[in-house]
Image (cartoon, grey):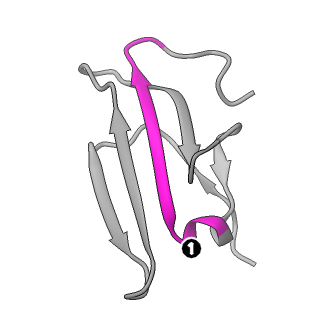
């Protein structure tokens, strides 16, 4: 088994990672208005990410990880 991946605010607006020629992982951000940028919410394949980590098996299966960013921290996210 692989460990879970801890997530934090991406440094980019969009990136696509080719996993094996058949699957890919897209990571997108919305709402970056400057620095600092905090995670307001996150979704993986349309489902809310409720914590600060995602299992490796999920990311390695491919899909779309979306971040909504804000200028102020969302203290409820990740609980």
Residue at 39% across, 53% down: 27
User: Number of numbered discs present?
Assistant: 1
Specify start and end residues of the magenta stretch as a single range: 58-72
Horizontally, is 10 left or right of 2 in the view? left
SS class, disc 1: helix
Q: Residues within 10 Å of mark 1 (few under 14, many from 20)?
A: few
Q: Nearer the viewer, residue 15 or 63?
A: 63
Outermost residue to the bottom: 21
- x and y percentages locating residue 21 in the rendered image: 37, 88
Q: In the image shown, does 73 or 45 lie closer to the viewer?
A: 45
Quadrant position of the N terminus in the picture: bottom right
User: Which residue shows up at 44% across the image and 11% down it?
Assistant: 72
Question: Going 44% across and 30% down the picture, which residue do you hit?
Answer: 68
Rendered image quadrant of residue 70:
top left
Quarter of the picture containing the C terminus is top right
Residue furthest out toward the front: 46
Using the image as rendered, state which of residue 69 and residue 7 is in the foreground. 69
Residue 64 colored in magenta in the image = yes
6 horizontally vs 19: left or right: right
Find disc 1 in the rendering and name its residue.
60
Q: Is residue 28 above or below residue 1?
A: above
Query: Does residue 11 lie above or below 23 as drawn?
Result: above
* Residue 2: x %, y % from top left: 69, 74
Q: Residue at x 67, y 72 (%)?
A: 57
**21 left or right of 44?**
left
Residue 59 placement (x, y as % from top left): 57, 65
């Amino acid at each position: 088994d692989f460990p879970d991946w801890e997530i934090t605010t991406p440094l980019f607006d969009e990136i696509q990672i080719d996993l094996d020629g058949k699957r890919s992982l897209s990571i997108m951000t919305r709402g970056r208005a400057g620095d600092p940028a905090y995670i307001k919410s996150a979704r993986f394949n349309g489902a809310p990410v409720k914590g600060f980590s995602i299992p490796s098996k999920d990311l390695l299966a491919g899909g779309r990880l979306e971040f909504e960013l804000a200028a102020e921290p969302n203290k409820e996210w990740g609980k």
